[in-house]
């Protein structure tokens, strides 16, 4: 409970900045925990993703390429200097996934799993883009 008195002594603009950073890190950690394990599973031949990609008509190399891209993107978003680029990669992957689901009439899948990630990654792109190249995303 010592944190509350400390926070009340901070200037309003610093407090807003801390709140914004906390929210960005929450979004970042959400995306990371979704994409790193998912990317890893896409590299395994015995995961459900093998069957799913085959049912959509995609070759094995494409499933693996998406898995590698998800692993890279999920790692990039943890580095504030690279976060916008990683989020842009996630956005691209999710746009392709939504397109696939729509082509196969799997509308509910697109809305429940891919759409939130698409929106969160778009928010992260816009939020982190101005801070590209700064120390720890502080804008300094």
Image (cartoon, grey):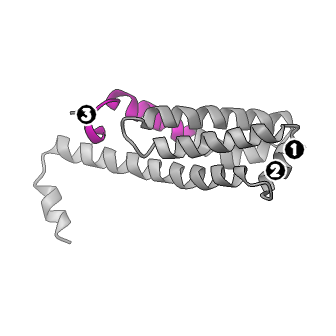
Q: Is mark 3 on a helix, strand or loop?
A: loop
Q: Mark 2 points at which residue?
A: 50
Say the numbered circle drawn on residue 27. Answer: none
Is 97 part of what is drawn in magenta? no
Q: Mark 3 points at which residue?
A: 139
Which is in the foreground here, disc 1 or disc 3?
1
Residue at x-position 76% and y-position 37%: 62
Q: Do the residues labelled 2 and 1 touch (CB within 8 Å)?
A: yes
Q: Name the residue under label 1.
A: 54
Q: Find residue 99 and report its horizontal and vertical position in percent.
A: 75, 32
Is residue 95 or residue 119 the one in the foreground?
Answer: 95
Residue at x-position 20% and y-position 72%: 1
Is residue 61 or residue 137 the one in the foreground?
Answer: 61
Residue at x-position 89% and y-position 44%: 55
- Which image quarter: residue 138? top left
Q: Give the range drawn in magenta.
A: 119-139
Asked if residue 111 is positioned above or below residue 34 in the image, the reply reads above
Q: Is mark 1 on a helix, strand or loop?
A: helix
Task: Work out whether mark 1 precedes mark 3 in sequence or the reverse, and give the earlier one.
Answer: 1
Q: Find residue 67 and report its horizontal and vertical position in percent.
A: 67, 45
Q: Find residue 51 and report its horizontal and vertical position in percent.
A: 85, 51
């Amino acid at each position: 409970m010592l944190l509350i008195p400390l926070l009340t002594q901070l200037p309003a603009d610093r407090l807003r900045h801390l709140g914004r950073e906390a929210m960005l890190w929450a979004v970042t950690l959400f995306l990371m925990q979704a994409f790193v394990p998912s990317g890893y599973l896409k590299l395994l031949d015995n995961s459900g993703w093998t069957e799913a990609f085959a049912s959509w008509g995609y070759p094995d190399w494409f499933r693996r390429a998406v898995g590698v891209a998800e692993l890279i993107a999920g790692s990039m978003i943890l580095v504030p200097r690279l976060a916008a680029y990683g989020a842009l990669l996630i956005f691209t992957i999710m746009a392709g996934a939504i397109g696939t689901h729509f082509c196969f009439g799997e509308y509910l899948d697109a809305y429940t799993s891919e759409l939130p990630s698409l929106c969160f990654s778009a928010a992260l792109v816009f939020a982190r883009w101005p801070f590209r190249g700064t120390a720890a995303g502080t804008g300094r």
